Amino acid sequence: MRFSRMFGKTLRSKPAEAEMPSHELLLRAGMIARLAAGIYNYMPLAWRVVRKIENIMREEMDAIGGQEINMPVVHPADLWKESGRYFDIGPEMVRFRDRTGRDMVLAMTHEETVTDLARRFAGSYRDLPFMVYQIQTKFRDEPRPRGGLVRVREFVMKDAYSFHRDASDLDRYYEEVCAAYRNICRRCGVPVVQVLSDVGMMGGSQAHEFMYVTPLGEDTLVLCPECGYAANREVATVARDGLEGLQLRAENADHPGGREAISGATGVREGKLEKVATPGKNTIDLVCGYLGVSPKRSIKTMVYAVHARTEGHAGAAKEKAGSKKRELVLVVLRGDLEVNERKLANLLRVGEVEPATPEEMKEAGLVPGYMSPVGLKGFKVVADLSLREDEEYVAGANEEGYHLTGVRPGRDFPVDYRGDVIVAREGDPCPRCGKPLKWERGIEVGNTFKLGVKYSSSMGATFRDEDGRDKPMVMGCYGMGVGRLLACIVEANRDSSGIMWPITVAPYQIHLVTLGASPRVRETAEAVYARWIREGKEVLYDDRDESAGVKLKDADLLGMPIRVLISDRTLADEQVEVKLRRDEAPKRVGLGELDKVVSELVASEFERFSVGASRPAAEY
RNA sequence: CGGGGAGUGGCGCAGUUUGGUAGCGCGCAUGGUUUGGGACCAUGAGGCCCCGGGUUCAAGUCCCGGCUCCCCGACCA
């Protein structure tokens, strides 16, 4: 490609809209152009990168037996009503009617369509397992697009779906997909960490996310540097022993206060529920400070509102889901901990929970600042595992200005649900090895879900098993955002001057630059360019009549891995200059050895991003 | 959807406080001088100052309404 003919232009200054380095560099390089919030054009250089990323994805999916297909972006809403998601998903799904008035949607993902295909074409256990994938546009009307290509509304995703006879076959295959995902990221030059994640709107039993770790990431990851435990904060757990046993005992040892303080402050014996006046002490800190008790010895009571879940099969009743009254749930946990709303929703088996509004609490007769489940009727109570039935706590008395001491969960109030509903904190003990956990931020480039039979059972995708019985297929689904991966490639491969493309995805492998306007330089470069094009080399040839500074700055910004420079100065010695983008120092190379040197560099650059023997052999 | 900010040649910005001929840098065009890190000289083109209404002799500037975009949250590949 001749630079002088290339559509697009580099920018000298940082565009005002740029939010993060990859965004700025892609804009300045003239590779992307925003059309609307979260909707981007891809210019020629970026599109070449996209095609290379897609091909790496294809190779890795094919290597684990995937078969590429293509499913539509516009779906009849009926399919989404069948799975029930038409009613569960909010305004992020674009809905419209076609000219005949039929309800249609834009695809946010393709579980419904692929499950429809599976039920039509796979009827026997002999047809299983199989995996199909596509690289296709999705549209999600995100509330807040951001970060250039990191969070957009229209995006291309590689999505794969596998179908199995049983869970153990899915488990086996799932590992292969995870390995393939690691290969894709490695080949694209993006380091990722695989973390446990929430199943989200996909449903299912287990899920992982593949995260590029960066302070600019949108997700918080909980990592154990010691044993490798890694989870999204939404689902991260902590070692309960460390939390409630050892630490609490240590705390009590340090603070002769502890339970004695409770009796001391109130004059009551241990083991009895007593009401104490705590005027104006309407926060955990105030109450505990006042009573001289550690917050770990107090019960925090939170009120959440939930909608009844629109579960399973579709039904006309769901149409009015929005009008349903919200049920209030009391959540109790140790006073020093915070509620993890994601875990709470999962425990209650609802899509989401929301903190109750002050009006709702008032209407229900609850007293903010002095709440507890003690003596209240008509509320479901969720107790976090951090509360022990053999300990006593300070809790609200449900009366302005009063608290209770000596409260025992279970004895003094009933517990309907018991589970892990707390947020893991930095420094909490790792659930696997007990060492302190660390927090990082990350961008999710891919995810994998064990869907199980959520879609196959609701949509009737069954197969006849060897035993003659019809069973729902066991499914997995696996997504990876192409544009988001591109953004992460830039994030992970750049310096202050510009992008440093890994050769595996670089728009062009070689950037040929001339300096000066002398005929000899021009003729030499033209000859080299013509020869390389003939040989099929990927070369961007900067043939512009620009000053040296402009051309070199552009070469750094655009970031092709190998730069070949021809000038009067180099030709004086019958040489050209060869430089890797990632290296500081250029090398002089005789004209006669140029092709050999470049070919070797191309090969060695590819070697840096190879996955070697770690790629699994095709299984099918 | 809450809270904050911004819309002025292609890009980055000033001008708005105090209403009075729309500016600067980069880019673009033409000619010339240059050519190892975003050169220089000269000449030139390019604007419904986001949209609609209002106040005024006069609105980029003041008032009302709307739209779009950005940031921080809530939400997600």
Image (tube, coloured by chain):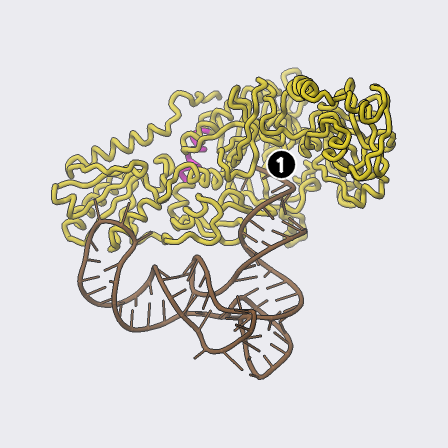
Chain colours: A yellow, B brown
Whether A52 is among the magenta residues is: yes
- In this rendering, the answer to whether B31 lies above or below A330 is below
- Residue A116 is at least partly visible in this image: yes
What amino acid type is highlighted by mark number 1?
Answer: Glu
Q: Position of residue A339 (x, y in %)?
A: 69, 32
Q: Please, what secondary structure does the residue beneath circle 1 have?
A: helix
Looking at the image, residue B74 sits to the left or right of residue A606; the answer is: right
- In this rendering, the answer to whether B34 lies above or below B36 is below
Figure quadrant of residue A221:
top right
Q: Position of residue A456 (x, y in %)?
A: 65, 29
Q: Position of residue A148 (x, y in %)?
A: 49, 46
Whether A588 is among the magenta residues is: no
* Chain letter behind tag 1: A
- Give me the residue at 48% from left, 29% from top: A181
Magenta stretch, main secondary structure class: helix
Q: Position of residue B1 (x, y in %)?
A: 68, 51
Q: Which residue is at the front of the view, A487 or A541? A: A487
Crowdedness near tag 1: few (<14), some (14–19) or many (≥20) residues, C-alpha within 10 Å: many
Highlighted range, magenta: A51-60
Q: Which residue is at the front of the view, A338 or A14? A: A338
- Give me the residue at 53% from left, 35% from top: A441
- Give me the residue at 18% from left, 45% from top: A527
- Residue A127 is at least partly visible in this image: no
Q: Residue furthest top?
A: A467
- Give me the residue at 51% from left, 25% from top: A178
Residue position marked by numbered label 1 in the rendering: A112
Figure quadrant of residue B22:
bottom left
Q: Which residue is at the front of the view, A211 or A83? A: A211
